Amino acid sequence: MPRAPKKQIYEFELAKDFLKQIGGDYAIEVVKICSAKRNPVTDEEIGKKLPLKITEIRTILNRLHYRGIACYYKTKNPKTGWCSYTWEVKNSRIAELLLEKQTEGISKLEKGMEFEGTHAFFSAGKGMTEYPFEIAAEYDFKCPETGKPLEAVNMQKKVKELKKKIEVMKTEVEQLQEFI
Protein backbone atom coordinates (compact mmCIF):
# COMPACT_ATOMS: atom_id res chain seq x y z
CA MET A 1 0.00 0.00 0.00
CA PRO A 2 1.56 3.38 -0.96
CA ARG A 3 2.39 5.74 1.89
CA ALA A 4 0.81 9.16 1.96
CA PRO A 5 3.27 11.93 1.07
CA LYS A 6 4.99 13.37 4.10
CA LYS A 7 3.27 16.43 5.46
CA GLN A 8 5.37 19.61 5.36
CA ILE A 9 5.96 21.39 8.67
CA TYR A 10 4.09 24.49 7.51
CA GLU A 11 0.99 22.40 6.78
CA PHE A 12 0.34 21.68 10.47
CA GLU A 13 -2.32 24.00 11.94
CA LEU A 14 -0.13 24.36 14.99
CA ALA A 15 2.79 25.54 12.84
CA LYS A 16 0.58 27.92 10.84
CA ASP A 17 -0.66 29.59 14.01
CA PHE A 18 2.86 29.74 15.43
CA LEU A 19 4.43 31.22 12.28
CA LYS A 20 1.64 33.76 11.94
CA GLN A 21 2.12 34.78 15.57
CA ILE A 22 5.88 35.26 15.07
CA GLY A 23 6.10 36.75 11.60
CA GLY A 24 2.61 37.95 10.68
CA ASP A 25 0.12 36.94 8.01
CA TYR A 26 2.66 36.18 5.27
CA ALA A 27 5.17 34.24 7.40
CA ILE A 28 3.68 30.91 6.29
CA GLU A 29 4.06 31.89 2.62
CA VAL A 30 7.66 32.98 3.18
CA VAL A 31 8.44 29.64 4.86
CA LYS A 32 6.74 27.75 1.99
CA ILE A 33 8.77 29.61 -0.64
CA CYS A 34 12.04 29.06 1.21
CA SER A 35 11.26 25.39 1.89
CA ALA A 36 10.34 24.70 -1.74
CA LYS A 37 13.79 25.79 -2.96
CA ARG A 38 16.74 23.47 -2.54
CA ASN A 39 19.13 26.44 -2.31
CA PRO A 40 18.88 29.58 -0.19
CA VAL A 41 16.71 32.33 -1.74
CA THR A 42 17.07 36.09 -1.86
CA ASP A 43 14.46 38.42 -0.47
CA GLU A 44 13.97 39.68 -4.06
CA GLU A 45 13.06 36.13 -5.22
CA ILE A 46 10.53 35.90 -2.39
CA GLY A 47 9.25 39.36 -3.36
CA LYS A 48 8.40 38.14 -6.87
CA LYS A 49 5.98 35.60 -5.39
CA LEU A 50 4.30 37.76 -2.75
CA PRO A 51 2.38 41.06 -2.93
CA LEU A 52 4.69 42.67 -0.36
CA LYS A 53 7.38 45.32 -0.39
CA ILE A 54 10.94 44.07 0.06
CA THR A 55 11.10 45.84 3.43
CA GLU A 56 8.04 43.89 4.62
CA ILE A 57 9.60 40.60 3.48
CA ARG A 58 12.83 41.47 5.27
CA THR A 59 10.86 42.25 8.43
CA ILE A 60 9.25 38.79 8.31
CA LEU A 61 12.61 37.13 7.65
CA ASN A 62 14.23 39.03 10.51
CA ARG A 63 11.45 38.01 12.89
CA LEU A 64 11.95 34.39 11.86
CA HIS A 65 15.72 34.83 12.17
CA TYR A 66 15.33 36.13 15.72
CA ARG A 67 13.72 32.79 16.67
CA GLY A 68 16.36 30.78 14.77
CA ILE A 69 13.91 29.67 12.10
CA ALA A 70 15.50 31.57 9.19
CA CYS A 71 19.19 32.05 8.65
CA TYR A 72 21.02 34.11 6.07
CA TYR A 73 24.25 34.17 4.15
CA LYS A 74 25.81 37.51 3.36
CA THR A 75 27.86 38.08 0.21
CA LYS A 76 29.47 41.30 -0.91
CA ASN A 77 29.64 42.31 -4.56
CA PRO A 78 33.27 43.44 -5.09
CA LYS A 79 32.32 45.79 -7.96
CA THR A 80 29.46 47.67 -6.31
CA GLY A 81 30.29 47.10 -2.65
CA TRP A 82 26.64 46.14 -2.05
CA CYS A 83 25.82 43.18 0.16
CA SER A 84 23.22 40.62 -0.78
CA TYR A 85 21.53 38.18 1.54
CA THR A 86 20.25 34.70 0.78
CA TRP A 87 17.86 33.09 3.20
CA GLU A 88 17.16 29.55 4.29
CA VAL A 89 14.46 28.17 6.60
CA LYS A 90 15.27 25.54 9.22
CA ASN A 91 12.17 23.32 9.44
CA SER A 92 13.80 21.38 12.26
CA ARG A 93 13.93 24.60 14.32
CA ILE A 94 10.20 25.18 13.77
CA ALA A 95 9.60 21.61 15.00
CA GLU A 96 11.86 22.16 18.04
CA LEU A 97 10.01 25.31 19.07
CA LEU A 98 6.62 23.67 18.56
CA LEU A 99 7.67 20.57 20.50
CA GLU A 100 8.78 22.77 23.38
CA LYS A 101 5.45 24.60 23.33
CA GLN A 102 3.39 21.39 23.06
CA THR A 103 5.33 19.64 25.82
CA GLU A 104 4.69 22.59 28.16
CA GLY A 105 1.01 22.60 27.17
CA ILE A 106 0.66 18.87 27.81
CA SER A 107 2.30 19.22 31.21
CA LYS A 108 -0.05 22.07 32.21
CA LEU A 109 -3.12 20.15 31.02
CA GLU A 110 -2.03 17.01 32.90
CA LYS A 111 -1.56 19.01 36.11
CA GLY A 112 -4.94 20.70 35.57
CA MET A 113 -6.59 17.35 34.87
CA GLU A 114 -5.06 15.89 38.04
CA PHE A 115 -6.31 18.85 40.09
CA GLU A 116 -9.78 18.81 38.56
CA GLY A 117 -10.00 15.04 38.93
CA THR A 118 -9.31 15.18 42.67
CA HIS A 119 -11.30 18.29 43.65
CA ALA A 120 -14.97 19.15 43.71
CA PHE A 121 -16.05 22.28 41.83
CA PHE A 122 -19.25 24.29 42.07
CA SER A 123 -20.88 26.72 39.65
CA ALA A 124 -24.07 28.75 39.24
CA GLY A 125 -24.55 27.42 35.71
CA LYS A 126 -23.02 26.86 32.30
CA GLY A 127 -20.42 29.48 31.38
CA MET A 128 -20.19 30.77 34.94
CA THR A 129 -17.08 30.72 37.12
CA GLU A 130 -16.29 27.38 38.72
CA TYR A 131 -15.18 27.47 42.35
CA PRO A 132 -13.33 24.74 44.24
CA PHE A 133 -15.16 23.38 47.29
CA GLU A 134 -13.23 25.53 49.79
CA ILE A 135 -14.06 28.80 48.00
CA ALA A 136 -17.67 27.77 47.33
CA ALA A 137 -18.05 27.05 51.07
CA GLU A 138 -16.69 30.54 51.89
CA TYR A 139 -19.48 31.97 49.71
CA ASP A 140 -22.05 29.72 51.49
CA PHE A 141 -22.57 28.00 48.11
CA LYS A 142 -24.07 31.17 46.61
CA CYS A 143 -22.57 32.73 43.48
CA PRO A 144 -20.89 36.05 44.38
CA GLU A 145 -21.70 37.37 40.88
CA THR A 146 -25.39 36.43 40.59
CA GLY A 147 -26.53 35.26 44.04
CA LYS A 148 -27.73 31.96 42.52
CA PRO A 149 -26.98 28.72 44.37
CA LEU A 150 -23.68 27.01 43.49
CA GLU A 151 -24.16 23.41 42.37
CA ALA A 152 -21.63 20.60 41.90
CA VAL A 153 -20.06 20.44 38.44
CA ASN A 154 -19.64 17.09 36.67
CA MET A 155 -15.84 16.95 36.55
CA GLN A 156 -15.74 13.53 34.86
CA LYS A 157 -16.86 15.12 31.59
CA LYS A 158 -14.22 17.86 31.89
CA VAL A 159 -11.50 15.34 32.73
CA LYS A 160 -12.54 13.23 29.73
CA GLU A 161 -12.30 16.31 27.45
CA LEU A 162 -8.85 17.14 28.85
CA LYS A 163 -7.67 13.56 28.23
CA LYS A 164 -8.87 13.80 24.64
CA LYS A 165 -7.06 17.13 24.14
CA ILE A 166 -3.86 15.71 25.65
CA GLU A 167 -4.01 12.71 23.28
CA VAL A 168 -4.35 15.03 20.26
CA MET A 169 -1.37 17.06 21.46
CA LYS A 170 0.71 13.90 22.00
CA THR A 171 -0.08 12.78 18.45
CA GLU A 172 1.09 16.16 17.16
CA VAL A 173 4.30 15.81 19.19
CA GLU A 174 4.98 12.41 17.56
CA GLN A 175 4.46 13.88 14.09
CA LEU A 176 6.69 16.89 14.84
CA GLN A 177 9.52 14.68 16.09
CA GLU A 178 9.93 13.39 12.53
CA PHE A 179 11.26 16.82 11.52
CA ILE A 180 14.12 16.84 14.01
Image (spheres, rainbow, N blue to C red):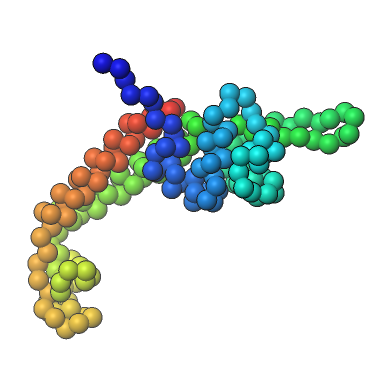
Which of the pair 109/14 is nearer the observer?
14
User: Could you say where residue 14 lies in the image, as x and y percent from the top left?
Assistant: 39, 43
Residue lying farthest to the top in this orientation: 1
Left or right, 156 with reference to 67: left
The answer to whether residue 134 shows anywhere in this view is no
Residue drawn at point x = 49 percent, y = 51 percent? 21
Quarter of the rendering occupied by the C terminus = top left
Which of the pair 45/56 is nearer the observer?
45
The answer to whether residue 150 shows anywhere in this view is yes
User: Could you say where residue 126 lies in the image, as x and y percent from the top left?
Assistant: 17, 68
Left or right, 33 with reference to 118: right
Left or right, 58 with reference to 128: right
Quarter of the rendering occupied by the N terminus = top left
Residue lying farthest to the right in this orientation: 79
User: Could you say where residue 56 lies in the image, as x and y percent from the top left?
Assistant: 65, 50
**Residue 168 sits above or below residue 112 on the image:** above
